[in-house]
Image: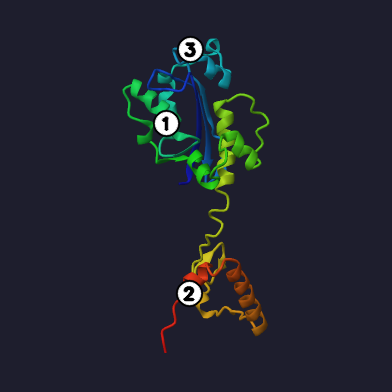
Amino acid sequence: MSRQIVLDTETTGLSAQNGDRIIEIGCVELQHRKLTGRNLHFYVNPERDSHEDALRVHGISNEFLRDKPKFAAIADELVSYLQGAELIIHNAPFDIGFLNKEMELLGRGPITALVEGVTDTLVMAKEMFPGKRNSLDALCDRLEVDNSGRTLHGALLDAELLADVYINMTRGQNTLVMELDTGEQSGGIEVQQLDLRSFELPVPRANDAELAAHEALLADLDKSTKGKTLWRVLEPQQAPA
């Protein structure tokens, strides 16, 4: 996937199904894993007030949002921007649930039907760092992404931070890929493909002293476990002569 959109939202509360709405959308574009600078950002009039707990998280006042466009007014631009891209989202079910609900309120199909796929960086982080905190702030600290400017949640800032986190989490996954075209020109240089099957790798063998030391170590371990070491238990029985 060459075009990816790192996306984050802020909302009036935690439940789209219970009437909470999107108040901010931040999108950062990656093309071939590089930031393009072609970002998208909206404040949205949710047509309702934010819960107090949500206000403490994002700090966006109800008064500030009164004159902002409603979701219906920005939907076409958002859809055009997201069309055909892969979405990168931290805790994707939350943001996707809100986006799909906003589209449903307009009588339109879900966002997920317009994009090529959704990657959840929270799921990725849990697989990479099991048992650790995997919030965006925790990942920034772990991956040395500067989040010193993040005192409140903001959709565009969080999307920018998540883009850095994602690139760091996936860095090196393509470095072992090498494309070689036998007999063809690549950048004006003829590249020959090597057949590694012709090479024999040397296999160092232990000498008598090393073998004796190894057996002595195994005997000590076997003695300390009273003969219950795994290699003795699984040792094949010799057939009778």
Give the residue number, with chain letter if any, for mark 1: 96
Q: Quadrant of residue 100?
A: top left
Nearer the observer, 14 or 64: 14
SS category of the residue bearing label 2: loop
Mark closest to the chain's N terminus, 2 or 3: 3
The residue drawn where x is 41% and y is 84% is 239
Name the amino acid, label 3. Asp
The residue drawn where x is 44% and y is 82% is 238
The answer to the question of whether label 2 and label 3 lie on touching residues, with beta carbons closer than 8 A, is no
Residue 195 in view, yes or no? no
Percent of width and height locating residue 127? 50, 46
Is 107 on the left-hand or right-hand side of 186?
left
Is 57 drawn above or below residue 163 in the view shown? above
Name the amino acid, label 1. Ile
Work out how far the residue at label 2 is from the one at label 1, CA to CA, in angstroms.
55 Å
- Residue 86's tag is none
Nearer the observer, 184 or 121: 121
Name the amino acid, label 2. Glu
SS category of the residue bearing label 3: loop
User: Which residue is outermost to the bottom?
Assistant: 241
Give the residue number, with chain letter if any, for mark 2: 235
Give the residue number, with chain letter if any, for mark 3: 49
